[in-house]
Image (spheres, rainbow, N blue to C red):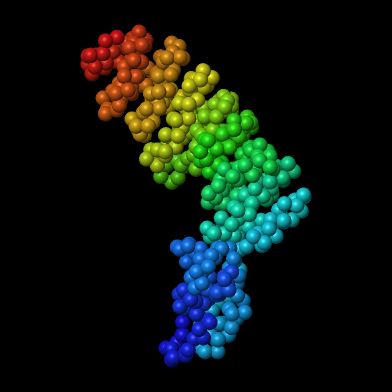
Amino acid sequence: MMDEHDEEVEVPQYFVCPISLQIMKDPVTAATGITYDRCSIERWLKAAEAVCPVTKQPLPNDQLTPNHTLRRLIQAWCVANGAQRIPTPKPVLCRAHLSKILRGVTVTHLQSPSSSLDQLLSLVSTGKEQDLKLMADCGVAQAMVGFIIKCYNQRDAMFVDQAFRILTPIWILSSSKDDIMVACNSVDIDLFFDAIAWVLLGNDVQRRSLAVNLLREMVKLAPSTSTSALFERLKPDFFKGLAAVLVVVDDVDSNGNGNINSNAKAAIRVLVEVCKHGRNKYKIIEANTIFHLIELEFGLGLAQPEKNKRISELVFCLLAQLCSCADGRAQLVAHSGAIAVLSKRMLRVSAMVDDRAIHILGLLCKYSATYEVLHEMLKVGAVSKMCMVLQTDCGKYLKDKIREMLRMHSYVWNNSPCIQLYLLTRYPMLQF
């Protein structure tokens, strides 16, 4: 810090941090009356007991007061002795400052919240963990939920984007997400999900992305939390909004490889989770989601399989859940390309996709085995693919399921000479 010709200049002892033994850049005084450099004392409190290093007395982490007078004396001394001047540190975020900012977004009317939102967004964008945790403790998440509901009630989406950008990182970092949900109930959390549905059904792609990414984080909560009951109360418009996200696909790139929009992937993750609660399965089906999922898989046919492997696995997992009921199977077979998609993706993506595809075909064979469905399975090559799966190193349960389907409907599939010959030459042990 000092120039070589100034090395013999004696530094006043009270300018030196008792921990680092260096000149303090941001002196703060603890509750015990001892002054430390902020960086050193905060590191000490994280690594050791919350006690004063000098007096060994208990030292609360949030009682560090900036010593502005000492900082100015150190800066003046550095200038007078030819040393590099210590820059003035940025103010440390505190509860009082946050409360003042939040008053700007909790007023009754949406008069001018932009200044307060900009300040909160600036704090979030710095990515400081301690600031985000303090914001979570001070109720910023609850304030943003209330603000989004206010925007929804007034049908004014001007500042919704900023609110989502503030809320999501605080939610991700918070160690008490369930407590946030409980606290949010005071502002009617059901209205918050209505507001999200309003955003998802809108035309702003960026706003949709922000909303669905927040939802993805919210459904990561354990099923035992208060969100379980909440997810059972979701309304049809919510699922219509998520279904609308599935139709958004990025353009094909210069190499002819299609890229499925990441928003669709996040939306499927949400649907897979909320499908387990209440009657959501039927609400998802009523939103025509199965049709959109099949169309999405058709889009994946243009893309690199290894790049979109995970999204295909999510699609097939969701389809398997939806096809467990009659309405889901009816909607699946109503799509002229659904069985073809199941056949095409087998043995091309992953073992999980193979498993779920065969599970879905098994449900069709057992509960929806009309002549048209069985003939379609034969026509598009689903039966041949199942026979090919028998040759792979898959689980015994999967092979047993395929053999059961082949035996069950041999009266239809054996009418095809090529399939009959294939089965007899490859699997003479199969008796139909």
Could you tell me residue 329's position as x and y percent? 49, 20
Name which residue lies at 37% across and 27% down: 355
In this rendering, position of residue 1 left or right of residue 72: left
Q: Quadrant of residue 256?
A: top left
Q: Is residue 67 visible?
A: yes
Q: Nearer the viewer, residue 111 or 290?
A: 111
Could you tell me residue 242's position as x and y percent? 57, 35
Q: Is residue 322 above or below residue 238?
A: above
Could you tell me residue 304's position as x and y percent? 39, 40
Name which residue lies at 68% across and 42% down: 186
In this rendering, position of residue 38 left or right of residue 98: left
Q: Is residue 66 above or below residue 380?
A: below
Name which residue lies at 43% across and 19% down: 363
In which quadrant will I find the C terminus?
A: top left
Q: Is residue 136 above or below residue 382?
A: below
In this rendering, position of residue 152 left or right of residue 73: right
Q: Is residue 83 visible?
A: no
* Number of numbered discs on residues: 0
Could you tell me residue 406's position as x and y percent? 33, 14
Q: Nearer the viewer, residue 111 or 414?
A: 111
